[in-house]
């Protein structure tokens, strides 16, 4: 039986209590303001099913004000600030996040359900790393001179900011996803309107305050809390927004692309994944299986890169199933503020019902639920907890194999040959990431070349770095976060011709 820690939340710090009990406001042009309509919505602790606080629901008037502020700052203080000074304020923002890491992790744990220790160890370093990496780019945005065929002509290019960016981020990694978008956009000289997911708005409000403390001028970073159909839609439609950078679901991403096309906005989309994690029998099978468990159960499977399709060479199948199940049963469900918690809740009851629906339909079609497959009981019943679940016997056409579940549900399937594996792994409409486990270097490179995914990990999984681009193929979206590619999407190139003939 899965070890279940008490569901009651330990006492939050005084700073967190004060923050949650305060009146939250939008950040527009450096000022904290109430939403124009006065309308608010609640954000919840998914581990307890209780309200944490309420935040403003930004409307069209608020979006208009934020866009006006961002456009003014773009043409004013931000454009006039020396690149080296932009770098310094980004560095200071990184320092401030590090200073407040424990508190930010606590607030985000309450808001998202993710274990605080995971946020402090993974999310905060990723956020800080992005800011510091892109701070280094501020002074390196050079154009080039071009030897044109026309006589007496000097031709050169300038790399200029694309304009006002609407950064719309998901609920699973609120802080680091915000920084993945803010850092390159600001380094490029753009101004930003950040819209966090309505399920997890709190760390964005903190980030906005820290940006001002770091010296980022008013209007350069604006924060609008609100729902997707109102606030998000208004940003996507607004003619003053030059670019939408979105991470989230495939369905919403497609809607954004369609809507943004009406004003020819630039769009980058990081969407879902149904990622094959492939274990060959010649690998260190035990290590591969243990890592595969972490690849799906980290943050309760609510990760776009989750290794949700485990594909195992037939002769290693039983060994892998046994080890993955053993790892799943070690996990301790509980509140994210408990140090012993290794598996938090799903983000909401709606998400729990969706995940459970996949598992129940699997049972009905004869798929074997080897472990898990139930919501948390006893002290966990009031939260959105779901046991880590392992399924075997699923067919390639079953929904648990083809659809992104976004929960702690793993299918384990056997394959016989390399060609069989590649064909089945690539049958997905997604192409975000994949894992390959083998000691055969030729096989590793052949599989990495054959698998249709934006990132392929070999003998590891879920490695990220600010210097390394991240994004998918096919229905997983287009455009990269991180790395040089993550910067380029916030820049546009201007060509200048100068006639110097006497």
Image: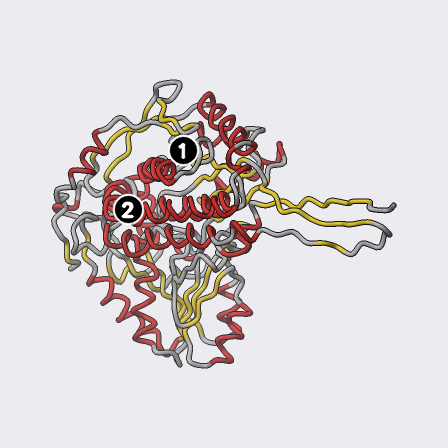
Q: SS at mark 1?
A: strand
Neighbour class for label 1 at 10 Å: few (<14), some, many (≥20)?
Answer: many
Label 2's element?
A: loop
Q: Position of residue 106 (x, y in %)?
A: 23, 45
Q: Is residue 48 visible?
A: yes
Q: Nearer the viewer, residue 413 or 97?
A: 97
Residue 267 relative to residue 337: left or right: right
65 shown above or below 143? above
Q: Quadrant of residue 319?
A: bottom left
Q: Position of residue 74 (x, y in %)?
A: 54, 34
Identify the image quadrant of residue 450.
bottom right
Q: Nearer the viewer, residue 444 or 147?
A: 147
Give residue 120's mark: none
Residue 74 lies left or right of residue 29; in this view the side is right
Residue under the point 39% across and 76% down = 314
Q: Residue at x 19, y 54 (%)?
A: 341
Residue 11 placed where, x, y %? 12, 42
How many numbered marks does the figure carry? 2
The residue wearing badge 2 is 346
- Disc 2 versus disc 1: distance between alpha carbons? 25 Å
State the residue position of label 1: 223
The quarter of the rendered structure image containing the N terminus is: bottom left
Mark 2 / mark 1, whichever is N-terminal: 1
- Label 2 vs label 1, nearer the camera: 1
Residue at (14, 43) in percent of width and height? 9
Q: Along the line of sight, which residue is nearer the eye, 81 or 449?
A: 81
Horizontal and vertical percent position of residue 280: 41, 76
Q: For this rendering, which residue is in front, 84 or 494? A: 84
* Image vertical order of residue 436 relative to residue 105, above or below: below
């Amino acid at each position: 039986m899965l070890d279940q820690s008490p569901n009651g939340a330990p006492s939050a710090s005084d700073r967190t209590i004060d923050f949650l009990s305060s009146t939250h406001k939008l950040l527009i042009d450096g000022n904290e303001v109430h939403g124009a309509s006065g309308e608010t919505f609640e954000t919840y602790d998914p581990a307890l099913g209780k309200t944490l606080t309420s935040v403003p629901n930004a409307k069209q008037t608020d979006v208009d004000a934020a866009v006006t502020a961002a456009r003014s700052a773009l043409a004013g203080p931000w454009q006039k600030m020396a690149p080296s000074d932009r770098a310094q304020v980004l560095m200071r923002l990184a320092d401030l996040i590090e200073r407040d890491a424990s508190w930010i992790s606590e607030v985000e744990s309450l808001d998202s359900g993710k274990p605080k220790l995971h946020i402090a160890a993974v999310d905060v370093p990723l956020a800080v790393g992005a800011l510091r990496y892109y701070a280094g780019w501020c002074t390196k945005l050079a154009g080039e001179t071009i030897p044109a065929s026309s006589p007496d002509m000097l031709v050169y290019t300038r790399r200029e900011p694309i304009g006002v960016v609407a950064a719309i981020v998901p609920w699973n990694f609120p802080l680091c996803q915000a920084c993945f978008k803010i850092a390159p956009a600001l380094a490029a000289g753009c101004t930003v309107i950040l819209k966090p997911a309505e399920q997890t708005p709190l760390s964005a409000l903190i980030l906005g305050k820290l940006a001002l403390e770091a010296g980022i001028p008013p209007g350069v970073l604006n924060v609008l809390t609100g729902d997707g159909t109102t606030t998000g839609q208004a940003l996507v439609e607004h003619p003053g927004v030059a670019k939408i950078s979105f991470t989230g679901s495939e369905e919403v991403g497609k809607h954004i692309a369609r809507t943004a096309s009406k004003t020819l906005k630039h769009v980058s989309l990081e969407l879902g994944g149904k990622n094959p994690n492939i274990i060959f029998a010649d690998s260190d099978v035990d290590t591969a299986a243990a890592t595969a468990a972490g690849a799906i159960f980290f943050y309760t499977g609510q990760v776009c890169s989750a290794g949700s399709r485990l594909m195992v060479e037939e002769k290693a199948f039983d060994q892998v199933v046994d080890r993955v199940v053993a790892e799943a049963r070690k996990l301790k469900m509980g509140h994210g503020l408990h140090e012993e918690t290794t598996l938090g809740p799903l983000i909401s009851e709606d998400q729990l019902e969706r995940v459970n629906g996949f598992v129940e339909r699997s049972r009905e079609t004869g798929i074997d639920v080897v472990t898990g497959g139930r919501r948390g009981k006893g002290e966990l019943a009031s939260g959105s907890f779901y046991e880590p679940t392992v399924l075997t016997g699923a067919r390639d056409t079953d929904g648990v194999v083809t659809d992104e579940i976004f929960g702690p549900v793993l299918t384990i399937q056997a394959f016989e040959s390399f060609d069989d594996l590649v064909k089945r792994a690539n049958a997905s409409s997604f192409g975000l990431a994949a894992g390959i486990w083998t000691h055969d270097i030729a096989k590793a490179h052949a599989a990495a070349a054959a698998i249709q995914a934006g990132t392929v990990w070999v003998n590891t999984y879920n490695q990220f770095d600010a210097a390394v681009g991240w994004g998918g193929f096919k229905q997983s979206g287009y455009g990269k976060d991180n790395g040089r590619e993550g910067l380029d999407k916030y820049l546009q190139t201007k060509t200048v011709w100068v006639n110097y003939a006497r």
